[in-house]
Amino acid sequence: MNDAPVVTDTHRITSIAELEALYGKPAGAAVTKEIDHLNGPYRTFIEKAPFVAIASAGEGGLDCTPRGDPAGFVRIVDERTLLIPDRRGNNRIDTLRNIVETGRVGLLFLIPGVGETLRVNGRAHITTDPALCATFEMQRQIPKSLIVVEIDRVYFQCTKALVRSKLWDPASQVPRASVPSAGQMVAATTEGFDGAAYDIAYPERIKQTIY
């Protein structure tokens, strides 16, 4: 039984003034690290990153999706513009729908073994330019579209979250069998679904549809 206190509205923060009074104002590097373009160090960080999470907002709500490829897959066009290939997926296109609706995105770049992360906030649109998409070909597969990100703000995040989580510590790795499999998760939401069969076929399906 969980003996933790029950959450109530008694201590709810309901205004920016209350929030700022609680935390105080940022100062020093917390403020000066934020700029509106890519400088040398920020550019290098993106070039070394094989993973980015894309947050987006649309009329139907919010979404955050992981994207990954060999390091440098997010292409730097100039100090204010990025290109991200939209690789083969499940056709939910949640992120792309949100981009069409509002164009608002936030990016979080991670590099294995590095504690800092890099955050980019900006506006995005989608292009299907054939010549441009062709330059992102992988394993003879060309993405159907690219996400074009126009940078409004960029800054790095310190290591605290990754230090606390021990994300890159090999000792923190969780045995895969201790976490529900893909088949088990689908079976839990779909009556009559054969999760075991799904899991057996899963590795080959990923191999065949990775790009």
Image (tube, rainbow, N blue to C red):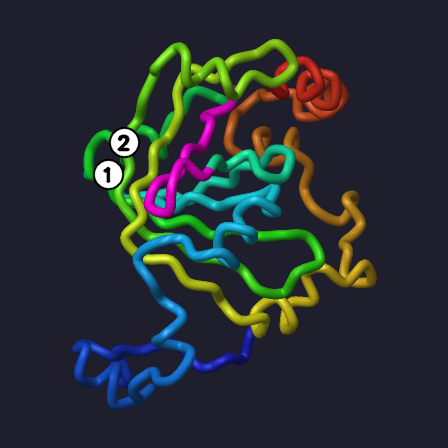
The percent coordinates of residue 86 (x first, y second) are 45, 26
Q: Main secondary structure of the magenta part?
A: strand
Mark 1, residues whose alpha carbon is within 10 Å: few (<14), some, or many (≥20)?
A: many
Quadrant in the picture for the C terminus = top right
Q: Is residue 87 magenta?
A: yes
SS of the residue at dot 1?
A: loop
Tell me: 44 left or right of 165.
left
Mark linked to residue 103:
1
Tell me which numbered mark, 2 or 1, is placed earlier along the sequence: 1
| Picture coordinates of residue 142, whole percent (x, y) | 51, 13
Q: Residue at x 38, y 41 (%)?
A: 78
Q: Locate residue 113 relative to residue 23 in the image: left or right.
A: right
Along the viewing direction, whichever of 57 and 141 lies nearer the viewer: 141
Who is closer to the viewer here, 86 or 10? 86
Residue placed at 77% from the left, 55% from the top? 173
Image position, residue 52 (x, y; %): 51, 45
Which residue is more in the foreground, 80 or 139? Answer: 80
Q: Is residue 35 above or below residue 57?
A: below
Find residue 10 and report its image quarter: bottom left
Amino acid at dot 1:
Gly
Helix, strand or loop status at disc 2:
strand
Judged left or right of residue 174, residue 31 is left
Q: Are marks 2 and 1 in contact (CB under 8 Å)?
A: yes
Q: Residue at x 24, y 38 (%)?
A: 103
First to last magenta residue range: 76-88
**Which of the image's four quarters has the N terminus?**
bottom right
Density class for disc 2 (Cα within 10 Å; few <14, some 14-19, many ≥20) is some
| Residue type at the position of mark 2 | His
Write down the residue under mark 2.
Answer: 125
Indicate whether residue 70 is drawn in magenta. Answer: no
